[in-house]
Image (cartoon, rainbow, N blue to C red):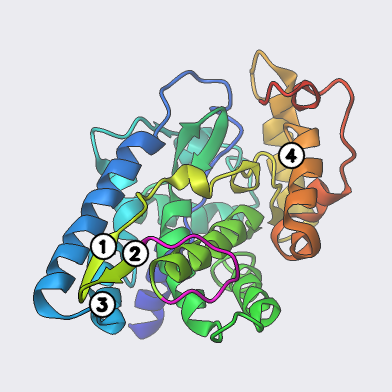
Amino acid sequence: MFVIVFLLSTLGQGSEIDSFTPRFRQFPDGLPAINKEVNKRITDAITMANKVSSCNILILEALLGGQLLSPFYGQIEHFANTSDNVPRFRVLFVESVYRNLPEFNFMLMSIGESLFGFGNVIHENGLLIGTDKFGHFFDEGHRFYGDLNANASNLDEVLSHSESTEDGIYGLGLGGVKSYADLVANYHGMHFWSEMLQAKFKHERRYLKCVRKQWVQIRQFNFRDYVDPAWDEGINCSQYQSVEYENAVLYSIATLPNEDMRSSRCPVYPSACTVMAHKYGRLAAKLIGPKCLAHKASTTDSTSSGTFP
């Protein structure tokens, strides 16, 4: 029984998304509604913390956790998947780029969809962001923030631990997909919790300060401070469990009836990879997929002219 529960919870946490099939569907950006909800929850946590403590960071962390965290299915991920206020697009598994998977992988992903649903995507300024990334940002980000030492000097070790989750049962080991976009969301989530609680990274902006023994919010939350093309699995290309698995996905992508042939390849916007490699510097090897890192910017790609996407 324990094994069954464990596998089911793993499938729930490792739900996949399709960043190719709806690439050029038109629907409004989803972040404004999510930002509003997150800010409301942060305000509620701060208000409660000020009632019960005098700038106690541990109490603040616990109350923020009650508003933003969940051990199995992220609260903000759930909001993004269910709220009528969040424009999103859902691709059914049987219509997704995973529809031609090898039999065993197809069965596992089918079970995951029937229990937890196949992942939704939202638009953000032309990017396609899986709603699962919000769970990674808050929940996994908090987990790995806790693993950082006081000055984040062990960041490389923590990022390797983060990557091991995608190499294991939450990624390649069970679902068959290693999502580098998940790793990027984990990384930015660490920064969020550091900015909200005890700063462990240098030169980061804080959300709060203590004034006369009360928390005062000095900065509003905005996902746009964190989201970039590396969150988009159509740009920050994933790795797959086997050659057979990858070929099945690539075949499905290549046969999409899209009006723009960019969606038939990954990265969809090659020059975004060059930008991301520069942005993340030495950390790019741990956060950006090999296909994206190896891709040279095309002079004909739309990002080259500054009109991304």
Please tell me the numbered disc located at residue 250: 4
Residue under pointer 2:
208
Asked whether the residues under the numbered discs 2 and 4 touch, taking CB atoms below 8 Å apart as contact, a structural biologist would say no
Q: CA distance from mark 1 to mark 4?
A: 50 Å
The residue that appears at 34% across and 55% down in the rendered structure is 218
- 275 left or right, relative to 102: right
Q: What's the CA distance linking mark 2 and mark 4?
A: 46 Å
* Main SS class of the magenta portion in the image: loop
Q: Which residues are magenta?
A: 198-207
Name which of mark 4 and mark 3 comes first in the sequence.
3
Q: Quadrant of residue 284?
A: bottom right
As measured in the structure, the alpha-carbon distance from the residue carrying label 4 to the one carrying label 3 is 43 Å
Q: Nearer the viewer, mark 2 or mark 3?
A: 2
Identified by mark 2, the residue type is Leu
Asked whether the residues under the numbered discs 1 and 2 touch, taking CB atoms below 8 Å apart as contact, a structural biologist would say yes
Q: Position of residue 281 (x, y in %)?
A: 79, 58
Q: Is 23 above or below relative to 2?
A: above
> Compared with residue 35, is residue 146 higher up or lower down, i.e. above or below?
below
Whether residue 306 is visible? yes
**Which kind of residue does numbered mark 3 sit on?**
Ala
Tell me the SS state at disc 3: helix
Regarding residue 266, the answer to whether it shows in the image is no
Mark 2 Cα shell of 10 Å, populated few (<14), some (14-19), many (≥20): some
Secondary structure, mark 2, is strand
Q: Earlier in the sequence, mark 1 or mark 3?
A: 3
